[in-house]
Image (cartoon, grey):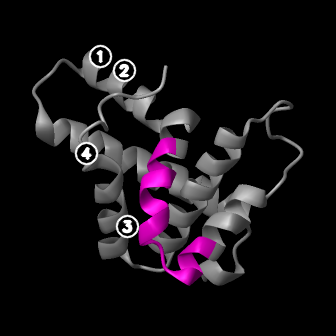
């Protein structure tokens, strides 16, 4: 699959899975909390509000190409998106498209690097409600 030929919706679909897996792996490695607690934290971390905040942290670290992929994903409109989709929802879709693009490109090191920008902030545990 050539990610340059994939639609933004496909990239976001793949990126949603990649980002969710990274979050769950990160949570599993940092604590021995009950699965229900880890699940609740994971859900909070993959919500569009949290992903929009992560994108703000990553944006200064993106290459020009990565910014283009993000913008393409953010600006993509589909007939099945929420009727009152917020700017945060579209930003989160851009983040997912970027992670999907990098994953399908085989650049797992860059995926991990950008994910670390999301998680390394001191206030990353304080997520929007």
User: Where residue 36 is drawn, which disc sits there?
Assistant: 1
Residue stretch rendered in magenta on the structure: 53-67
Q: Secondary structure at mark 4?
A: helix
Secondary structure, mark 1, is: helix
- The total of numbered circles placed on residues is 4
- Front-most of residues 32 and 51: 51
From mark 1 to mark 2, how far is it between C-alphas?
A: 6 Å
Give the residue at mark 2.
Answer: 40
Instruction: Give the dominant element type of the magenta stretch: helix, strand or loop.
Output: helix
When the figure is inspected, residue 80 is found, relative to residue 18, above or below; the finding is above
Mark 4 and mark 2 residues within 8 Å of each other at the beta carbon = no
The first of marks 4 and 3 along the sequence is 4
Q: Residues within 10 Å of mark 4 (few under 14, many from 20)?
A: few
| Residue that label 4 marks | 25
Q: Magenta includes 98?
A: no
Say which residue appears at 72% left-offset and 67% top-offset. 72
Of the numbered discs 4 and 2, the one sitting upstream in the chain is 4
Is 11 left, or right, of 109 in this rendering?
Answer: right
Which comes before the other along the chain, label 1 or label 4?
A: 4
Q: Are marks 3 and 1 in contact (CB under 8 Å)?
A: no
In the displayed orientation, state which residue is furthest to the right: 79
Q: Earlier in the sequence, mark 2 or mark 3?
A: 2
User: In the rendered structure, are the residues bearing label 1 and label 2 in contact, judged by CB atoms less than 8 Å apart?
Assistant: yes
Instruction: Locate residue 24, reporting x and y percent.
Output: 30, 40
Residue 12 falls in image quadrant: bottom right
Pointer 3: what residue?
111
Q: Earlier in the sequence, mark 3 or mark 1?
A: 1
Where is residue 79? Give x, y as percent.
Answer: 89, 45
Residue sitting nearer the eye, 86 or 46: 86
């Amino acid at each position: 699959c050539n990610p340059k030929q994939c639609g933004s919706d496909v990239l976001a679909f793949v990126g949603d899975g990649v980002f969710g897996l990274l979050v769950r792996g990160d949570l599993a490695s940092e604590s021995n909390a009950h699965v229900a607690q880890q699940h609740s934290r994971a859900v909070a971390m993959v919500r569009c509000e949290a992903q929009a905040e992560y994108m703000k942290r990553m944006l200064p670290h993106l290459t020009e190409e990565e910014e283009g992929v993000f913008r393409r994903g953010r600006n993509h409109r589909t007939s099945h998106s929420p009727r009152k989709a917020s700017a945060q929802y579209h930003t989160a879709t851009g983040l997912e498209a970027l992670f999907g693009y990098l994953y399908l490109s085989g650049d797992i090191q860059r995926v991990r690097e950008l994910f670390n920008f999301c998680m390394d902030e001191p206030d990353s545990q304080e997520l929007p409600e």
